[in-house]
Image (cartoon, rainbow, N blue to C red):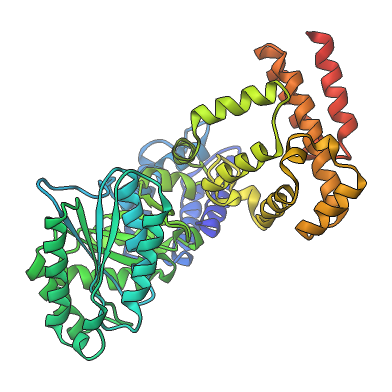
Amino acid sequence: MFAALTDRFSEAFRRLSGRGTITETNVREVMEEVRTALLEADVHQEVVNTLCEEILQDALGTAVIRSLKPAAEMIGIVHKRLVEVMGAPSPGISLVEPGPTVVMMCGLQGSGKTTTCGKLAAYLRKRGQSVLVCAADLQRPAAVEQLRIVVESVAQDGTGSGRVAFHGEPDKCAEHGRATGAAVGVCQRALRRARDERFDVLIIDTAGRLHIDEPLMGELAAIDRAVEPHQILLVVDAMSGQDAVASASSFHARLAVDGVILTKFDSDTRGGAALSVRRITGAPIKFVGVGERSTALEEFHPERIAGRILGMGDVVSLAEKAHEAVDEAEAARMAEKMAQGKLSLDDLVSQMRMLRKLGPIKQLLGMLPGVGSALKGLEFDETQLDRLQGIVHSMTPSERTNVSSLDKSRIRRVAAGSGVPTADVTKLTRQFESMQKLGMQLGGMGALGRAGAMREMARSGPGGLSSKGSSRTESIKAKFKKRR
């Protein structure tokens, strides 16, 4: 995300760092580049004008010209102003007592509103809340059925301690759905059920249109009056840039929305919507959708997003993802098994699954400081993990535990069962055996020895555990065996 904007900012700041002396003219030249970058990112022109003027005044007023590190000073100033433009962090969902807390979701067709309802239910469930999701879109064909499938998928996921249920009345669709009162009645009955069954939160998925019109706003206003939602959240497509800002402004003027959810945020390479919505509409961005999974909904943190835009990474979000996905007790058990040389291929697959819970590999690496720009143009084949899992699952339980038992005939059987060349199976077994041996070697070292071994592995490159790099791996182990 923000790839183009990050590249343009980085190039502009490099020009400052590469000069022996800095003048006011140099700073103004850089600001012209920053301005162009923001406009190309589809940031609202009013926001661009104000932001650039504020940054320029800050830069000239804080002695950037006399600074020994003018580029670093400029990055700090821009970061501060970007955070202000996106607004202060806004709490995700403020719950009321007694419940249920009523959340009304609105937005245009195609914005991802229905799937976002499921993601929000999963987000709340993970935090121990029980959620009822109501299908109030009686206009779009199969909208009720689509939401039912989404909600049932979340309910079966098993993540979190809360319960998730669906409320839909498909018989009220079609000709009945054209009447405003039909949707209002569905919402009222859903609210009664939420109270009777003691749900903590009621999420209402309202109808959308391809554009904002009076019938749509009339229905939303009627639902608003009937159920008096505690929060109205607007779902907009981040990739639509200034169109997203325009629709947000229109909805906010009619409904006074409490917050915005930007969908497809992980695919938004420009960032115009994220940088414009708060300043133009006054409504805070509460969440961003960062993938297709039900868990791919994150709270919006302006300071972290500004860091990503400026290539500073987002280590805090990465740590939070790891904390949510990694079972510490399981990780400790795996480390012990590895130190004893008892790690099995089933354990390796389990670790791969845990890694994938964190999200796409390229997205995770982009959260590391300075790594984002290095990933430009690189693609990561995530299907390799599926292939590895297929190979392992084509083995018998005893073969997964003892890979040395895989002779040529067994390797051919596993390759045929998983649909891969025999060379892939052989490579996996050799890599795994090397990893087991190295794990035992590291397990017997002190902390300094382990750290040194890992440094040597890093220097050896990605072939350190490959069949080609097996000699290098052996030399690493031999070197540190002498030090023990």
The answer to whether residue 58 shows anywhere in this view is yes
Q: Quadrant of residue 89?
A: top left
Is residue 94 positioned above or below 292 on the image? above
Pick out the residue farthest to the top: 484
Image location of residue 476, percent across then percent down: 83, 23
Instruction: Please tell me which residue is depicted at 19% across the width and 88% down the height of the picture.
Output: 176
Is residue 271 positioned above or below 477 on the image? below
Is residue 234 positioned above or below 23 on the image? below
Quarter occupied by the C terminus:
top right
Instruction: Please tell me which residue is depicted at 40% across the width and 49% down the height of the picture.
Output: 158
The answer to whether residue 378 shows anywhere in this view is no
Left or right for 6, reference 342? left
Image location of residue 289, percent across then percent down: 41, 58
Instruction: Please tell me which residue is depicted at 50% across the width and 57% down the height of the picture.
Output: 2
Image location of residue 281, percent across then percent down: 24, 63
Image location of residue 33, percent across then percent down: 50, 57
Pick out the residue farthest to the bottom: 175
Of the pair 283 and 209, the residue shown nearer to us: 209
Instruction: Please tell me which residue is depicted at 44% across the width and 63% down the height of the picture.
Output: 264
Pick out the residue farthest to the left: 225
Left or right for 125, reference 438? left
Of the pair 131 and 466, the residue shown nearer to us: 131
Q: Quadrant of residue 449?
A: top right
Left or right for 427, reference 398? right
Of the pair 21 and 93, the residue shown nearer to us: 93
Count numbered badges in the picture.
Answer: 0
